[in-house]
């Protein structure tokens, strides 16, 4: 049995995680962390990690990048593994996460969906086969409340493709300001925000007289919750290190 604490317990993803956990018999939620401490289930919710009444086996963080310092301080001081599932981290914060993984088990990915991580693998394979013969564009769509753009998942896809192509590409985010033809070395990144779109990603390989499109669409947030829970159960008995969804795909 894996005892989980949810950071961001009162948020939409926090409640999704709880609802998914209660359908399983390999884990349970023992505590929550949230600036809003109103309780809605049979576990306590505290404002800060330091206030947790019990030490969990794993913390799942679906809160906000502003919570990172307190979480990492707690996890490193107590040896608690953490699944980092929030988005919008700065380069400096990502460096903090990687540094913490030298002391504790850290599971960090830009997207917790198994399907998205399979999409990453398919995009890498397509890039290795198509090489520079095809132009590459990434389109991501999310709900109108999402703050960061492009999404962390779009960046993850672009980075995976670029690494496959020996980091020969650069990213272009805004064609409105570019009055010139598309360069072969570009990966175009496009963000759409509207309505209640949970998350859609397309990787477009456009060649001469043919187009290949790889896509993933999430119908609900539960796909991310289940991925995070699977990661937490996996992480419980792992040694210190940095882990990601490629181990679960």
Image (cartoon, rainbow, N blue to C red):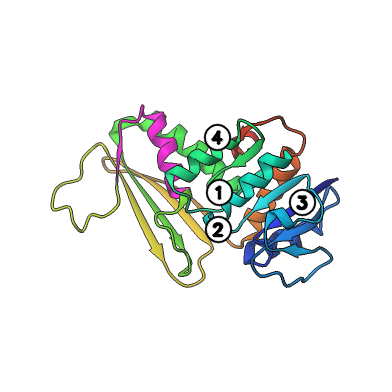
Q: Which residue is mark 2?
A: 64
Q: Is residue 13 visible?
A: yes
In primary-sequence order, the first of circles 3 and 2 is 3
When the figure is inspected, residue 151 is found, relative to residue 131, above or below; the finding is: below
Q: Which residue is mark 1?
A: 111
- Could you give the CA–CA distance between mark 2 and mark 1, rounded to whole angstroms? 15 Å
**Which quadrant is home to the N terminus?**
top right
Q: Main secondary structure of the magenta part?
A: helix
Q: Is residue 231 left or right of residue 206?
A: right
Residue at image location 68% in from the left, 43% down from the top: 75
Q: Nearer the viewer, mark 2 or mark 1?
A: 2
When the figure is inspected, residue 180 is found, relative to residue 218, above or below; the finding is: above
Secondary structure of the residue carrying numbered label 3: strand
Q: Which residues are magenta?
A: 153-171
Residue 242 picture quarter: top right
In primary-sequence order, the first of circles 4 and 2 is 2
- Could you give the CA–CA distance between mark 1 and mark 4, rounded to whole angstroms? 20 Å
In primary-sequence order, the first of circles 2 and 1 is 2
Q: Nearer the viewer, mark 4 or mark 2?
A: 4
- Could you give the CA–CA distance between mark 3 and mark 1, rounded to whole angstroms? 19 Å
**Image position, residue 55 (x, y; %):** 79, 48
Q: Nearer the viewer, mark 4 or mark 3?
A: 4
Residue nearer the viewer, 88 or 128? 88
């Amino acid at each position: 049995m894996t005892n989980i604490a949810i950071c961001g317990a009162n948020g939409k993803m926090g409640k999704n995680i709880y609802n998914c956990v209660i359908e399983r018999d390999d884990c349970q939620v023992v505590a929550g962390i949230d600036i809003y401490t109103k309780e809605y289930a049979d576990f306590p919710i505290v404002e800060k990690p330091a206030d947790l009444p019990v030490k969990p086996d794993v913390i799942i963080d679906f809160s906000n990048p502003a919570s990172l310092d307190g979480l990492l301080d707690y996890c490193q001081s107590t040896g608690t593994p953490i699944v980092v599932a929030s988005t919008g981290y700065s380069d400096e914060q990502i460096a903090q996460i990687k540094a913490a993984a030298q002391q504790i088990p850290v599971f960090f990915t830009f997207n917790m969906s198994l399907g998205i991580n399979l999409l990453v693998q398919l995009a890498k394979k397509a890039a290795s086969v198509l090489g520079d013969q095809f132009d590459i564009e990434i389109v991501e769509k999310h709900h109108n409340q999402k703050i960061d753009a492009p999404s962390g998942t779009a960046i993850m896809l672009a980075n995976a493709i670029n690494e496959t192509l020996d980091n020969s590409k650069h990213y272009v985010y805004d064609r409105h300001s570019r009055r010139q033809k598309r360069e072969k070395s570009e990966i175009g990144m496009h963000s759409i925000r509207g309505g209640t779109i949970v998350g859609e990603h397309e990787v477009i390989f456009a060649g001469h007289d043919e187009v290949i499109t790889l896509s993933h669409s999430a119908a609900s947030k539960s796909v991310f919750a289940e991925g995070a829970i699977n990661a937490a159960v996996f992480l419980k008995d792992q040694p210190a290190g940095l882990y990601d969804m490629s181990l679960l795909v």
